[in-house]
């Protein structure tokens, strides 16, 4: 039966990381528990929601953990409740001891709390991925790519494949990531520092957002392993599994236009602020759009809500070339797109009032491109 | 028609204060608007939910306001929406101009936003209180008294009078404030620095909580005026009106015991932490109680939930006198009581396992007393 003692704060931190894969109210009750596996080498905390699984290892070699394992074993504990109890304990040292009937006794200072656990055999098996020949990525680069694309994935299940982000590696080092909800698209290309085996997978955008939360900035590199329908992101202590989406991702390359009639450059944050003002009123209109007008080099934004009022605003530009144009679109798509752009300036290129327009950061016009489809108005 | 210009940030701050009286979805739609009254002297912002009304005055003399009034008048604007629009404006200076058909044009930088307003005549009249012979209180003292009592008022409407806090002034300077929900009671007495007319009123605890949010610490003193069924708290710029509760407040003095069999002193925050641990498990029990045991000078807390587990904890004491005792109660009441006590140490006095027990801060045993009723268990 399990018996160990550990630094409460480090244990709590690891529990909270693992809990990101655990939903409080899962249709499968056993998935609301955390699995605690104790071996002579250390403790593994395991959580899963069926889609994403996290294994978090605390080694007896980790000096900050103060981990002393007296006796090994496995047990399941209700995750949210267990975390609340651990965080309430008075002392920095926590003693965890299994007693009869799958109960555990937590002792800390003068406090003694007994909790009922469950048999670890009830826990589903996380599919193993043969950990050979990994792709090695810098965590920060992978997180940037996710932040630049995942927001554009669909949140509706009508076309499940569009709820994912398409990751394609070609020539062993050219990585292309794309997401689209069919109204807007975001595509980022990077060249890897180290070669890897080519792949073509669609990763659920929700899993990727959890990934960015779990892999903190202290974790410098991450190893990526593929199996049939799963992907594993692994650091020294954390293994993050997610299922892949099945099906063919649409060909998005053919959507990207290359010739334009009007090209404008804006200050990114000024344009975003103008769109946020416009959105306050466009939310109260029937089609929810803002109208952008380019007239003789002057750009202005207009919203007219018969119920609430109207916005008219001249928007400062860095440069304007090409023809005059009037185009209407959902300002939220432009706000989301601008949020994903780190660059001080952004270049927006138009073809016509009914064709998608593109955004590129002015400092990296080749590798990061976004598309927004306009709304036809009368 | 109204026309003024003002510093956006100061205007926004005043709007947000006024908005505390405005509920977004009021059964009376006109009460979701803010009334803006512009005179040559300044701007008054008025909000009301029928229970609480706030008038906030911005003087043309206020240098931080940068207020220039060109033309006077009154108008109503949807409060939440108007505040969102003002906070989105690009420039520090905001120009506010009424045009035809109760519309207003906000101009700031290159942004021009037109909003539809409503006729100010539609707004209900806030009852006037003749502002003579005020009671003058230090804001901090009044806020402390509210924080020490209002939490103990009832949140249920079954006995409406108990949703208020009983304020009684006797001898022109002895103020007693009491709140109880019939399970616990909190009473604070203070002696006023300046004499006032005696009164006996019951103020809704919800109004008092709004009062503590509206009257910030920079406002040193507050004048209090009474009318038949209303009370007015007034500072230089803010008038805060609230309706009073009608009916007789129960006689609470007779509830306060004076003789005890066991008297214990604890460190306030240690006891609170122990009760918070106990509550994690008592929430999962049928009667939601923690059992406190005093045995030969040792105090311990116990919870036993057949479903979830149990807590057993020895609690450090500063002193223990009197008889052994076992008593059960809802730990939330004790946690709330301890939160209201600023003192490092707290003295708890018991009579028996079925009689209410008292809490007093160890540094002020005369003026602040709380009562908690135990729960009978088998």
Image (cartoon, coloured by chain):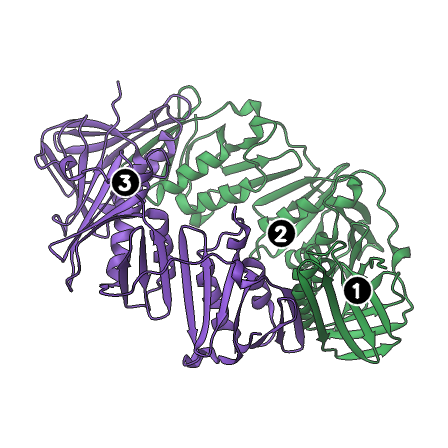
Chain colours: A purple, B green
Task: Categorize mark 2 by other alpha carbons within 10 Å: few (<14), some (14-19), many (20+).
Answer: some
Do the CB atoms of the residues marked 2 and 1 lie less than 8 Å apart?
no
Vertical relation: A168 (above or below) B355: above
**Callout 1–callout 3 Cβ contact below 8 Å:** no
Q: Residue at x 47, y 56 (%)?
A: A124
Label ID, residue B246: none
Q: B233 above or below B280? A: above
Residue position for label 3: A247
What is the quadrant of the C terminus of chain B in the image? bottom right
Q: Which tag is nearer the camera, tag 1 or tag 3? A: 3
Q: What is the x, y in percent for residue A118?
A: 59, 61
Q: Are marks 2 and 1 on the same chain?
A: yes
Q: Is residue A153 left or right of residue A118?
A: left
Residue, disc 1: B367
| Relative depth, front residue between A309 and A127 | A127
Q: Secondary structure at mark 3?
A: loop
Q: Residue A346's spot in the image, x, y percent?
A: 18, 45
Q: First in sequence: mark 2 or mark 1? A: 2
Tell me which chain the residue with mark 2 is part of. B
Give the camera-side residue of B136 and A37: A37
Q: CA distance from mark 1 to mark 3?
A: 73 Å
Q: State the residue position of label 2.
A: B212
Residue A53, horizontal then vertical, whole percent = 41, 57
**C-alpha distance separating marks 2 and 3:** 58 Å
Q: Secondary structure at mark 2?
A: helix
How would you rate the neighbour count of disc 1 (Cα within 10 Å): few for under 14, some for 14-19, many for 20 or more? Answer: few
Which chain is indicated by disc 1? B
Q: Residue at left 26%, top 56%? A: A144
Q: Chain of mark 3?
A: A
Q: Is residue A54 left or right of residue A375?
A: right
């Amino acid at each position: 039966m399990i018996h160990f003692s550990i630094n409460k704060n480090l244990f709590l931190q690891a529990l909270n990381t693992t809990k990101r894969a655990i939903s409080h109210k899962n249709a499968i009750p056993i998935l609301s528990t955390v699995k605690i596996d104790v071996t002579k080498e250390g403790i593994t905390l395991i959580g899963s929601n069926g889609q994403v699984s996290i294994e978090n290892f605390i080694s007896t070699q980790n000096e900050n953990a103060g981990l002393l394992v007296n006796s090994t074993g496995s047990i399941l504990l209700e995750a949210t409740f267990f975390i609340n109890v651990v965080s309430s304990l008075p002392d920095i040292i926590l003693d965890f001891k299994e007693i009869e009937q799958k109960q555990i006794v937590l002792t800390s200072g003068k406090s003694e709390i007994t909790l009922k656990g469950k048999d670890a055999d009830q826990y589903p098996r996380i599919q193993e991925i043969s950990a050979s020949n990994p792709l090695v990525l810098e965590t920060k680069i992978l997180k940037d790519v996710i932040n630049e694309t995942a927001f554009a994935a669909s949140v509706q299940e009508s076309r499940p494949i569009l709820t994912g982000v398409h990751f394609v590696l070609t020539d062993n080092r050219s990585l292309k990531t794309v997401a689209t909800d069919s109204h807007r698209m975001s595509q980022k290309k990077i060249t890897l520092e180290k070669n890897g085996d080519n792949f073509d997978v669609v990763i659920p955008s929700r899993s990727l957002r959890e990934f960015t939360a779990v892999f903190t900035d202290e974790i410098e590199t991450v190893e990526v392993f593929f199996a049939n329908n799963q992907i594993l992101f692994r650091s020294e202590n954390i293994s993050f599994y997610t299922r892949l989406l099945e099906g063919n991702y649409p060909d998005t390359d053919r959507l990207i236009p290359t010739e334009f009639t009007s090209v404008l450059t804006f200050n990114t944050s000024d344009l975003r602020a103008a769109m946020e003002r416009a959105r306050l009123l466009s939310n109260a209109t029937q089609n929810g759009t803002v109208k952008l007008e380019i007239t003789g080099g002057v750009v202005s934004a207009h919203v007219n809500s018969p119920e609430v009022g109207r916005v008219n605003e001249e928007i400062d530009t860095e440069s304007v070339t090409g023809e005059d144009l009037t185009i209407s679109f959902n300002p939220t798509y432009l706000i989301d797109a601008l949020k994903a752009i780190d660059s001080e300036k952004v270049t927006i290129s138009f073809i016509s009032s009914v064709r998608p327009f593109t955004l590129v950061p002015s400092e990296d016009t080749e590798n990061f491109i976004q598309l927004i489809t306009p709304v036809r108005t009368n």
